[in-house]
Image (cartoon, helix red, strand yellow):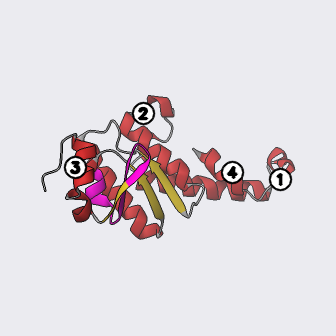
Amino acid sequence: MRVAFHHRIGYSLLDSVLDGKIFREEESKIRAEALTLLEQFHLKGLRDELAKNLSYGDQRRLEMVRALATRPKLLLLDEPAAGMNASEKRDLIELIRRLHQELKLAILLIEHDMAVVMNLCPRILVLDYGVPIAEGNPDEIRGNPKVIEAYLGEKARH
């Protein structure tokens, strides 16, 4: 996970080979920031575990930690709730909400779980086979006949 931080290191290869002061200070900062992120995502106790050994929900949270380590201005989340149980989805919604508020981070969410989308997103763009069919707030989307037809497979009642 710490590899995600290395795009912004301030030491040279020589500093790392010589285990110099700059190298030690930077690595200490990276270690501290990594532990903070792992703690925020409730993964600190698993910090020495291989990613492949984590539960699916923990792996998804680790993916977000790695993305955040790069200090993005925009976080792209592609189906973060896929494969999660109801409890994990509730935790995920709160986590994404907290990230947006605390880090002032713009988030683009691609998700098929409408409960997650409706509980999390203030603005929604609905695509049907890549073609936009609706845009609006959750209430507007919930009642949109095109969305109902595309996602429920039935003709919308007018």
Front label number (4 vs 3): 3
Q: Residue at x 70, y 57 (%)?
A: 8
Mark with earlier residue (2, 3): 2
Amino acid on which the number 1 mark rests in the picture: Ser
Front label number (1 vs 3): 3
- Using the image, determine if residue 13 lies above or below residue 158: above
The verdict on residue 120 being magenta is: yes
Q: Which residue is mark 4?
A: 6
Amino acid on which the number 3 mark rests in the picture: Ile
Mark with earlier residue (1, 3): 1
Q: Residue at x 56, y 57 (%)?
A: 33
The numbered dot on residue 12 is 1
Q: Which residue is mark 2?
A: 54
In the displayed image of the protein, which residue is found farthest to the right?
Answer: 14
Judge whether residue 90 can be spotted in this image. Answer: no
In the displayed image of the protein, which residue is found farthest to the top?
Answer: 53
Amino acid on which the number 2 mark rests in the picture: Leu
The verdict on residue 136 being magenta is: no
The span picked out in magenta is 115-132
Mark 1: give few (<14), some (14-19) or many (20+) Cα within 10 Å.
Answer: few
Q: Which residue is mark 3?
A: 148
Q: In the figure, is residue 61 to the left or right of 142? A: right
Q: Are marks 2 and 3 in contact (CB under 8 Å)?
A: no
Secondary structure at numbered mark 1 = loop
Q: CA gap, disc 4 to disc 3?
A: 46 Å
Secondary structure at numbered mark 3 = helix
Q: CA gap, disc 2 to disc 3?
A: 37 Å
Relative image position of residue 100 (x, y in whole percent): 42, 65
Mark 2: give few (<14), some (14-19) or many (20+) Cα within 10 Å.
Answer: some
Q: In the figure, is residue 17 to the left or right of 126? A: right
Q: CA gap, disc 1 to disc 4?
A: 11 Å
